[in-house]
Amino acid sequence: MLFYSRKNRPFELGPYPLERLSHSKSIIAIEANKPKVSRPGITINNNENSFSKAISKYKGMFGELGVVDPLPNKAPVPDDLALRTKDVKGAAYFLDAAQVGICKLVKNSWYKESTAQNHTHAIVIVVRPGRTPEVENIAHEWASGHEIAAAELRAIEIAVAVSEHIQWMGFKAKAHDHQSGDVDINRLSVMAGLMVREGEKLLNPFLGESFAVAAVTSNYLLNVDEPLAPSAKNGRGLSYWLGFGSAVPGIEWSRREKRPTHLSAYPMETVQRVDRPTTIIIDEEVPRVPKRAEFFARSEFGDLGEKSRVERGRFSFKHPFAMSMVSLIKRMVPEQDGEVKGNGSGKYKDPGENAKALKSISYLLGSEITGICEIPEYAWYSNRKDGSEIPYKHKYAVVMLIDQGYETMEGASGDDFISGAQSMRAYMRGAEIAGVMAEHLRANGFPSRPQTNADSDVIHTSLVMWAGLGELSRIGEVVLNPFIGPRLKTVVMTTDMPLEVDKPIDFGLQNFCSNCLKCARECPCDAISWGDKVMFNGYEMWKPDVERCSRYRLTNPKGLACGRCMKTCPLNKVVTWEGPLMTRMASWFGINVRFMKPILVPIAVWLDDWLGNGIRNPLKKWWLDMEIVDGHAIEPRKGVNQRDLNLKHKIDPTEQKMAYYHASDMPPPNAVEPFIVDRKAALKAKDLLETPLEALARVAIGGAKPKHYIPTPPLETSVDQSSEAKKKDLWWGKN
C-alpha cells in the first residue's frame, strides 16, 4: 500500500474499508416494516446502440444460468459460520466485486409478484463501473451512458458464479439482478450494510450513486452484516484517501480515474518498445500446428494414457467454485461466431483512433492490459481437433491480459484447490470481454471473433509478444508482463477492423530469467529447464518438458492443475500505488535502469527468497478446500498441497531429463484414435536441437529448414473424422 501494507488485511474484507464505517441495527426493523414493492418494469432504452445491445445480450445469457442439477449430498462445510462467510465473500471479491454484504431475508425482501422461496440469506454484490471514454475518443459514442449496464453485466456474472458455487456444495441458491430477479435488491443492499437511503435514492459511502448491484439468495447459513448508519453515507474521509485499515487508498482510485481511458492502470507506455520480440523467431520456419498436437488435447484422445484422459474432464474444476464458472464459459462458446452486419469501413477509417477506442472499451469491460498486433500466419492453428482445416482470415489481434488475482495467489501454494478457479475466472472474464467487443464490431460491419480458452483458432503466445504485452520467460511457453509478471491468462479478439498495432517490448526479462532459476527450483515436477535456451519449432526458448508438466497438472491429487511457477516468480507482484514501495522501486529500476540488471538480478532473487516471497499468507486464504467426486463435494481424498519454498532444490542442467516433441512427432491432425506419446524417443530428440546461434548461422548461409519442424501429415482415411471426434465428448463440446 501507499501508506499501509495490505499484506495484513484479510482478503474477505475487500478493497473498501466498510468495516470502519458506523452501523445501526435499528435499520433492520425499519426496512422489514416497509411494504413490499412491485418488480420494476423493463425500462426501454432509447439510447441503445450496438455496444449496449451486446451487453444486454450477454446479461440475458447469464441471467438464464445459475441453477445446477440437485446434488445428492451436502459438502462437508464447517459449522463455523465465519469460515463459511469468508469463503462466500472471498469468492465474490475474487471475481472483482467492489463490496459484498450479507443479510437475512424478511417477508418484504421478495417482490409482490414473486413466489417467496425457502431461502434464508442474501449475498449482495456491488460492482464499481468502468471509466467513460473521453469525448474525443470514438468509444465515447459507444459507451457513454452504458457504463452502469457494463457493470451490471459484471454483477450478474459474479452472482451466477457465487450461486452455483453454493449449489455445488449442496445448498439452494439463486442469482438475481434488477432485470430478472425476484427480490428487492435495493432493500437487501441497505440491510446488508452497503447502502444508505436518502429519500428515493440509494447512496454508497464510497461510490455515491454510481454502482451496479446483484444478489444471491440461499438457504446456506452465513454471518450477516449490520446496516450502515445514516451518518455513513459519505465514507470518503482522510482514512479512505490514505488507505487506513489497509484498504485500497482513495489516492489509487483517483490515480486510475485520471489516466486516459485507452491506457491501463499500469504504465505500459513507459516500457521500451522494439521492432521484434526479444525472443528470436525465425518466422518462415515456425510451423502451423494442429489443435490435436496440444497436450491437453492429446490427453482427451488418450495419448497420455487412461488416467490422464479421465482426469482431463475435471482436472481444473473439481472444486465447487471452479466448477461454478463452467456453465458461464460453456454458454459463451456458441456466441463466438456471429453474423457480420453491414460494412463499417466508411465510418471507422483511422487505425489509430480505432485502436484507442477498442482499448478503452476493453478496460471498461475489465481487461487488465490490452495490446494489438497483426497476426502472423503461423499463429493460426492449421486444423481443428476433428481434422478440418482452419483458414487464417482476420488481419489483427486485440490481445488482452486477465489478472488471476494477486492476493488469492498469495494465500495459495500454486497447486492447491484454488489454482483451477484462478484459471476459470480468467477464462470466463476474458470470454465475456472479447465476446461483447466482437458482437459490437460485427454489428458495425467488421468480421470479428473471440479466441478463447474454450475455442480458439489462434495460438496466443506469439500474439502476446507481438502485441507488446510481455516477453517469453524461463517458465517456457509463458509470457511475462513487467507489471503483473506471469499471473495472467489471455484472450484474443481477431478482427479486420483497421487498427494501429503496438510494438513488442523489452524490459530486460531475458537477462533476468537467465540469472533467476526460482521457477525451475519450485516446479513440483521438474518440468522447467535449468539449462540454456534452445531453438524449438522456430522459436528461441527455455523449452519446458510439456508432457511432464501436463501429466502433473492433469493428475495432481492434492489440488487443481498447477500454477506453482506463477506463484513463486519474483515478478509476481503488485506495482501500482497500492503495492509496497520497495516493489514499486524495484520495478522502476528493472524497467528504466537496464544496464544494472547483471548486478541487480542475483541480489533481487536472493532478496526475494530472504523476504519469503512465494510462501503462503494465511490471511489471504479465503476458500474451503473441497473436491468434487461423482457429482458432489467431499473433503480432498489425498489431502491438500501446502508447499512453501524449496530453497535447497537444484538440478544439474546436464543431468536433467527433458522430453522434446517436435512438429514431426505430433499426431496427425485428423487422428481420432490414441497416438500414444513415445517419451523415450522424445528424450532422444534433444539431439536435434540447435542453439539460437547455430540456427541464426544456418539461416544466414541459406541452410534448409530442419525436417523435424515439418508437422506430421494427415492420415489418408475415408472415415468421417468429424463424427468420430465428436463421439469422444471433447472439451467444451468443441472441436
Image: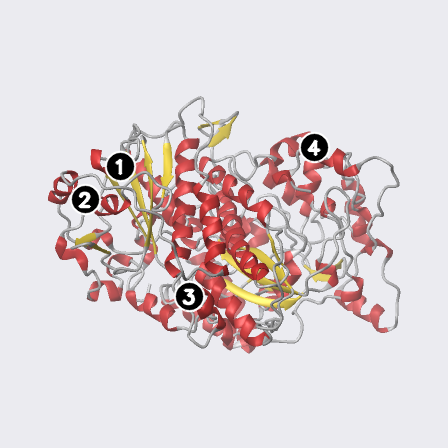
Q: Which residue is mark 2?
A: 226
Q: In the image, what residue type sits under mark 3?
A: Thr
Closer to us: 719 or 286:
719
What distance separates the C-alpha of mark 4 from that of mark 2? 52 Å
* First in residue order: circle 4 vs circle 3: 3
- Observer-side mark, 2 or 3, equals 2
Q: Quadrant of the C terminus?
A: top right
Q: CA distance from mark 3 to mark 1?
A: 48 Å
Residue indicated by mark 4 = 728
Can see residue 115? yes
Local crowd size for mark 2, using a 10 Å CA cut-off: few (<14), some (14–19), many (≥20): many
Q: What amino acid is labelled 1 in the image?
A: Trp
Q: Where residue 131 sits: x, y (%)?
A: 39, 66
Image coordinates for residue 584, horizontal then vertical, percent: 41, 68
Q: Looking at the image, tell me whether mark 2 or mark 3 is earlier in sequence order.
A: 2
- The mark lying in front, picked from 2 and 1, is 1
Question: Label 4 sits on what residue type?
Answer: Lys
Q: Residue 499, image x and y in percent?
A: 61, 71
Q: Examine the rendered structure and indicate whether residue 340 appears above or below residue 267.
A: above
C-alpha separation, residue under disc 2 versus residue under disc 1: 20 Å
Q: Earlier in the sequence, mark 1 or mark 4?
A: 1
Q: CA distance from mark 1 to mark 4?
A: 45 Å
Q: Residue at x 51, y 39 (%)?
A: 327
Residue found at x 52% / y 38%: 317
N-terminal-most mark, 2 or 1? 1
Circle 2: element type: loop
Above or below, 511 relative to 478 = below
**Tag 1, which secondary structure?**
loop
Where is mark 1, residue-wise?
110
For label 3, the residue is: 583
